[in-house]
Image (tube, rainbow, N blue to C red):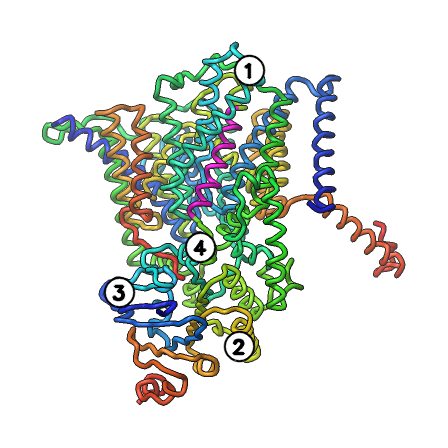
Amino acid sequence: MVLFLQQMINGLSVGSIYALIALGYTMVYGIIRLINFAHGEIMMVGAYIAFILAVNTSLPFILILLISMVLSAVIGVLVERVAYKPLRKAPRISVLITAIGVSFFLQNLALVIFKADPKIMPELIEKKPIAIGPLQVGTVTVTTLALSIVFMIALDLFVKRTKPGKAMRAVSEDKDAAVLMGIHVNKTISLTFAIGSALGALGGVLYGITYTQVFPTLGVLPGLKAFIAAVLGGIGLIPGAVLGGFVIGMIETITKAYLSSQWSDAIVFGLLIIVLIVKPTGILGKNEKEKV
Amino acid sequence: MNNKMLKNYAINLAVVILIFTGLMGMMATGMLNKYHQGIIIFILINVILASSLNLVTGFLGQLTLGHAGFMAVGAYASALFSVALKGQMPNLLLLIISLIIGGIAASIVGIVIGIPALRLRGDYLAIITLGFGEVIRVVINNIKITGGAQGLTGIPRIASFQSAFWIAALVILVLYRLTHSKQGRAILSIREDEVAAEAVGVRTTYYKVLGFAIAAGFAGVGGGLYAHYIAFLDPNTFGFMRSVEILVIVVLGGMGSLTGTIVAATVLTILPEALRGFSDFRMLLYSFMLIVMMLFRPQGLFGTGEFSWQTLYDRTKLVHSALRKREKRGGIDGSTGSK
Amino acid sequence: MALLEANNISIQFGGLKAVDNFNLQINDKELVGLIGPNGAGKTTVFNMLTGVYMPTEGDIALDGRSIVGKKPYEIVKMGASRTFQNIRLFKELTVLENIKIAYHHDLHYSTLSSILRLPSFWKYEKLAEEACLEFLDIFEMREYADTLAKNLPYGKQRKLEIARALATKPKILMLDEPAAGMNPQETHELMETISLIRKNFNIAILLIEHDMSLVMGICEKIVVLDYGKVIAQGTAEETKNNKDVIRVYLGE
């Protein structure tokens, strides 16, 4: 039982990382209906930035984290401006391919700069077990969970309470109507990429710390899983991404611990398939029928 | 068959034979070495994979991201067959039967996946096919008969340039004929407007599954060729990224353009090889070029049109007569219109 | 027995009863107009008759056979075809291809004969080419045969959509607000097209419109719908003088 609870906490911690990354996917999809395949790479970039700072400076962890998030946000916005914005009126599949191109590009850029071999992430969070009753939980796990929750609450408040947040929701509801209401759509899209990328970078840094490594293809697998999480919860929906992230994290951890680590991916993808067949719009999504 | 069509068939056949003998000649004289030959075979395999995906994505209008899964099914099914029966029949016969088995196996998997998946549209279909593709990969990775993660060895290396060339030509011919028939029109109508297609009596589900099954089958054939050229199968080469690579060829060539697919498959297979001189920067340049190409030609190289010699001829004639007219008038800006 | 018969059909969306106990009989070769103000439930009725929605109660029979629960393409095969309020053509295909797609039930060759180009393929493709061109002749659209549907002017797009629906060889043609978005000249052309159909094809037509003048001018029978209920039924003259109809259209 104790072991199971411990696994649950691990699952929550992994899930919170997925949730952070899934938020970026879902926000971008919500606003421009693009599966941003480059998002996993933004996460990887965030992890590398933290790695460089940690190796070369003695800045405190929280500052390293913030710098990484800000720089990744800038890169995310830059990618949108250069590679996606010119294609806003093009067929959607062209933008998808461009996103894939950006993903390759960032991966190979990292490969050229840092080479393929994994770099050891310095111990940014002091590792020691914390006892919660009979449970032994690592500091990394606790910090990951705490930081994720703090930023998710901040995002929720931002989207619901602030003017730019409301603009974001308006643009994702109806772009044309938003323009008529005087909302600056391009700015809002950039803002969405900035926030999504910053959260992705946060996920990346935490992922790097949890698995103590950084490497050029770091973003691929968690990116894919986070994307599944976003779909599972209902793509385009912020609470859906969080829910999906936790669900995927839990299932993955539990299947790895109790069933088989080889098959855990198949179970995750199988779950995705079942959810899509039963309810394509995801757990929290609304079903919509095409109007005739 | 009218005269114009007969002429077109004759021209195309002549061009295909010309390319074939040309390449054969260059291989015989050593102008193209073993390494070049390998690249050409990969181009042909990519033509098969991408043109089959084009049927689903370009002609049928359904975005899928799991094509590598069907390639894997075909590769493993055909390889397992030929491993079991190698030496017991002539190589060419063994290859043909293996490829047919690979194609049928992939096709069956395509139908099984297609029936539930094709009820979904747009991005959701893309995602569910991605899921199925990955499940196929994980399954191959974890069962005994496929050799699991260690890979499958001992496959007879019986695919050659000749067989790959004619199979690719056959696949293109079949796809061209299929798309230019009543079935092809039904498939196109689904891409254009599924609701309207149903309203004029097109059995949309049937044609979607049909297109999907045929595409999966050809992907299986492509996979089978790959298996019998490389002679070794590693499940992780059939991941999501492989599906993406095939999709990139389709989009770059033009959705619904088979000739575009052939050109794009050639360009995108040669490009990374041609960039080898840049060593580490190779893939960086490749991805950069991909982005630039999409930014400048979002509709792909050929759009939805097919290249045909007739149109090229008509067009050059048109250009020539326009130039001549301009020459007669002395050109608009006084130039002769020649350059 | 009527060609198309809707018996007490109702449909409910959540708590809202969009159509309530709707009845309709259309006889062979009859031209019936279904009118009503915006939001009266006309399109909902239409979508039930064409299999897009399934009525929660009641039955719809075409030629004596129930069409409830049938897929739209099955209903087409049974002999009812339709057009859409917001024209839905196969935009990137040519005018001729648009017609050929609707004509494909009469082309009896298999996928295999397409691939092998067997004689049956050539035979039926030739037939399709000729029949569809002839078809375009009836509508005086042959000159547009190789034009992409999206490049046609608006009035011609509507005409093509109607021609395409007729190419499925229906017993009844259902037109969903065909005059929507048309200028007077295009509307006039549309009325000509409808009388052309009456002359050349022996079929019934159900016309949904909120443009009273169009319906009054050509329909033999008119059904007036308001808030999902039939409030009047009869000839143009009868409905024109019905006090409920006047109330609905002119206010009290």
Instruction: Answer yes or no: are tags 3 and 1 on the same subunit.
Output: no
Tell whether A83 sits left or right of B263: left
Q: Which secondary structure lies at badge 3?
A: strand
Label 3 resides on the chain identified as C
Q: Which residue is mark 2?
A: C191
Q: Which residue is mark 4?
A: B198
Q: Residue B157 bears which disc, if any? A: 1
Asked whether the residues under the numbered discs 2 and 4 touch, taking CB atoms below 8 Å apart as contact, a structural biologist would say no
**Magenta span covers which residues?**
B205-224
Nearest the viewer among C160 and B42 is C160
Tell whether B59 sits left or right of C177: right
Task: Give coordinates of residue B101: x percent, y percent.
Answer: 47, 25
**Spatial separation of the CA atoms under disc 3 and disc 4:** 24 Å
Task: Give coordinates of residue B144: x percent, y percent.
Answer: 35, 17
Label 4 resides on the chain identified as B
Residue drawn at the location 55% of the way across and 35% of the way down: B50
Nearest the viewer among A207 and C208 is C208
